[in-house]
């Protein structure tokens, strides 16, 4: 289970959303958190950050009148990676539409309502009642280390606390969803008046986790707590592979995770990849150019989106740049 920690950043766009419920002062929480220890995205650097060239993998699917680009993302990044240029920028500029895993509602209240409905136990069941005393003590220590009051989140679903504990420490280390490709591409699309669509809704993606059996949810949360100190080095490996466009290395990293928990791979990767391939095939019936950006884990290894497209008679070709 713990190996899924290095897979989530390249599979589920819900990771940037996960911080919404737990940042002190957010209305999703029961009451304002103490202001002495806020957890928030890092402030903008005082001096310009040196940039490093990154060339993530890009694929294209074409027919006579339709072009669809497939771009893999890592959902949180630090400043300084120059990825939105060269072939990636050219493909985006040529596109009539941006398509993401999901599109967040513009109204924060809508996000709050969706989050409350799916991430808080309706019967008030506590995490302490789901976990062993030893595991709950470790979990409480991890939450406390982030400056958050553990009692405030006792009725949250285990999977949601696992997601949050896998992202909040990274924010303190300088990673930022605002630097991630989804938000950068969204801003660029809005600036150029490109329509933005989602392959899934927020409810659908949250529901992927919410439907997991409780035993798997608790195991995931325990794994995050146990390996919380390894989050940064694991993410650094993925970002390095992603930046180099090394899809084979990325696939090997992800395959290691998937082999240990095939049931999660089926739910979080393979079923979704097949569904997205169906949507892409249907979109090929309309003329135009679309830039599709999804977690890089969906475009690497066996049972990738490209594999399912091939089954549907479509060929995704790697863009050489």
Image (cartoon, rainbow, N blue to C red):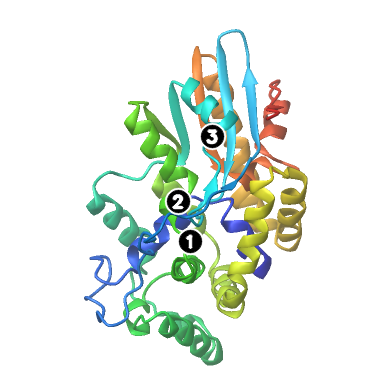
Q: CA distance from mark 1 to mark 2?
A: 8 Å
Identify which residue is drawn at 36% across, 72% down.
Answer: 39
Relative side of 16 to 262, left or right: left
Which mark is drawn over residue 179? 2
Which mark is drawn over residue 159? none
Q: Quadrant of the C terminus?
A: top right
Q: Does dot 2 land on a helix, a strand or a loop?
A: helix
Query: Which residue appears farthest toward the top when viewing the image?
Result: 64
Q: CA distance from mark 3 to mark 1?
A: 21 Å
Q: Is residue 11 above or below residue 217?
A: above
Identify which residue is drawn at 49% across, 28% down.
Answer: 92
Q: Determine crowd level at label 2: few under 14, some 14-19, many 20+ residues with C-alpha closer than 10 A.
A: some
Say whether disc 3 or disc 1 marks the residue closer to the N-terminus.
3
Residues at circles 3 and 1 in contact by the CB criterion of under 8 Å: no
Residue 226 picture location, percent across and down: 60, 80
Q: CA distance from mark 3 to mark 2?
A: 14 Å
Q: Determine crowd level at label 3: few under 14, some 14-19, many 20+ residues with C-alpha closer than 10 A.
A: few
Which mark is drawn over residue 175? 1
Residues at circles 1 and 2 in contact by the CB criterion of under 8 Å: yes
Identify which residue is drawn at 63% across, 43% down.
Answer: 298
Q: Which residue lies under the disc numbered 3?
A: 85
Residue 60 picture location, percent across and down: 63, 25
Relative side of 144 to 152, left or right: right
Q: Does dot 1 land on a helix, a strand or a loop?
A: loop
Q: Quadrant of residue 222?
A: bottom right
Q: Look at discs 3 and 2 and give the one toward the viewer.
A: 3
Instruction: For residue 301, say whether it is visible.
Output: no
Q: Look at discs 3 and 1 and give the one toward the viewer.
A: 3
Instruction: For residue 201, say whether it is visible.
Output: yes
């Amino acid at each position: 289970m713990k190996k899924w920690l290095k897979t989530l950043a390249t599979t589920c766009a819900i990771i940037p959303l996960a911080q919404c419920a737990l940042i002190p002062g957010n209305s999703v929480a029961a009451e304002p958190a103490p202001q002495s220890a806020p957890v928030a995205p890092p402030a903008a650097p005082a001096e310009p950050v040196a940039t490093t060239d990154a060339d993530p993998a890009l694929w294209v699917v074409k027919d006579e009148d339709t072009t669809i680009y497939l771009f893999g993302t890592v959902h949180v990044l630090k400043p300084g990676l120059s990825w939105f240029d060269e072939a990636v920028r050219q493909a985006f500029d040529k596109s009539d539409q941006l398509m993401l895993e999901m599109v967040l509602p513009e109204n924060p209240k809508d996000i709050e309502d969706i989050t409350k409905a799916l991430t808080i136990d309706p019967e008030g069941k506590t995490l302490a009642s789901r976990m062993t005393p030893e595991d709950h003590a470790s979990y409480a220590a991890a939450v406390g280390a982030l400056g958050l009051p553990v009692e405030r989140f006792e009725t949250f679903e285990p999977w949601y606390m696992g997601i949050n504990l896998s992202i909040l420490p990274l924010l303190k280390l300088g990673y930022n969803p605002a630097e991630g490709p989804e938000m950068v591409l969204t801003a660029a699309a809005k600036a150029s008046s490109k329509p933005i669509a989602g392959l899934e809704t927020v409810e659908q993606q949250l529901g992927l986790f919410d439907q997991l059996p409780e035993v798997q949810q608790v195991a995931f949360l325990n794994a995050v707590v146990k390996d919380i100190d390894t989050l940064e080095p694991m993410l650094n490996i993925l970002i390095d592979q992603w930046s180099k466009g090394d899809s084979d290395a990325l696939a090997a990293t992800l395959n290691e995770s998937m082999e240990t928990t095939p049931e999660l791979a089926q739910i979080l990767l393979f079923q979704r990849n097949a569904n997205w391939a169906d949507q892409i095939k249907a979109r090929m019936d309309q003329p135009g150019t679309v830039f599709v950006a999804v977690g890089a884990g969906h475009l690497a290894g066996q049972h990738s989106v490209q594999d399912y497209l091939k089954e549907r008679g479509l060929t995704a070709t790697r863009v050489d740049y």
